[in-house]
Amino acid sequence: MNFKTRIILSGALAFAACGDDDTPADMGTTPVDLGTPVDMGDAPDDMGTTPDMGMEIDMGMQPSLTTEAEIKAFLEGETLVMEGDDIPTHPNGFSEDLDLGASTQCYNQSTIDVMGGQFQTTSILGTLVNMMCDRTMAGGTAGPFVTTTLTLSNISGNADCFDVDAAYTGFGQEGRGRITTTGTVTVELELFFTGQALGHRCADGMVGTSSITLNGSEFMGDAVQVYRAQ
């Protein structure tokens, strides 16, 4: 008894024959010329090849972040989180170890949700212990605070530096920021309460540059808040 198996690979037709011990050695005048065995690896649609899933995404491609509109569109819908070592020693310019009452800058975590081109900021406070900020000991919650206006201006490079002005009900923040998009999206914001700092804009240097005067004195602390997209 003879069996013929027909395999279709992307329109290419290959024939193979198999049999049992009763199959005559001489195929005689069988009309099908078996010819040279088909190399399965040469088939037009190699089954070992990964299927084409469409356009290949270039992971090295960077988004354009050269205007306020592009930056806000890029961040829209993102949840940005600052915690642990990403919290600076001087948030908004004031030492985290100072007891400033309702304005104490000791934080456990801070979250910014970007919605409608605005920031919604919610913070979990840390705990002051013997005039030292314990970031690991969560205290109360501050916020959420939603910006009434958020302006990103004087943008240099691909969001390498941009000035930030954020107005909330009852207070405001101003300073400079930058965005990195290699790996995890990171937003760095060097912010101070409105009207208290000088030398804190991109025209004075990049984020973290020692160029700042706070309330008339040279600022020696670290106010760079680092937020990572979740």
Image: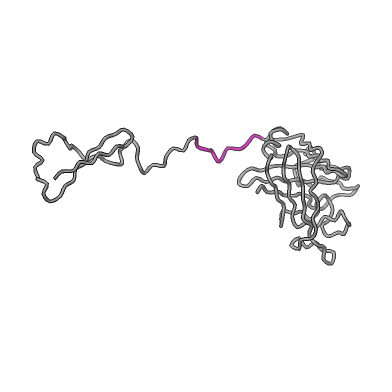
The one nearer the camera, 190 or 151, is 151
Where is residue 14 shown, x and y percent of the image? 25, 37
Left or right relative to 199: residue 30: left
Report the label total.
0
Residue at 80% from the left image edge and 46% from the top image edge:
145
**Colour scheme in use:** one colour
Which quadrant would residue 84 be assigned to in this image? bottom right
Where is residue 85 shown, x and y percent of the image? 71, 56
Report the quarter where the N terminus lies.
Answer: top left
Left or right relative to 181: residue 209: right
Highlighted range, magenta: 55-64
- Main secondary structure found in the magenta portion: loop
The one nearer the camera, 165 or 175, is 165
Q: Which residue ends up furthest to the bottom in the rendered image? A: 130
Residue 59 magenta-drawn?
Answer: yes
Q: Which residue ends up furthest to the right in the rendered image? A: 216
Residue 202 magenta-drawn?
Answer: no
Left or right relative to 52: residue 63: right
Where is residue 99 shown, x and y percent of the image? 87, 59
Q: Which residue ends up furthest to the front in the rendered image? A: 1
Residue at 13% from the left image edge and 33% from the top image edge:
31
Left or right relative to 59: residue 15: left
Residue at 68% from the left image edge and 34% from the top image edge:
70
Where is residue 128 shown, x and y percent of the image? 82, 63
**Relative height, residue 79 to residue 97 (above, below):** above
**Relative height, residue 193 to residue 158 (above, below):** below
Residue at 73% from the left image edge and 50% from the top image edge:
111
The one nearer the camera, 55 or 178, is 55
Which quadrant would residue 181 be assigned to in this image? top right
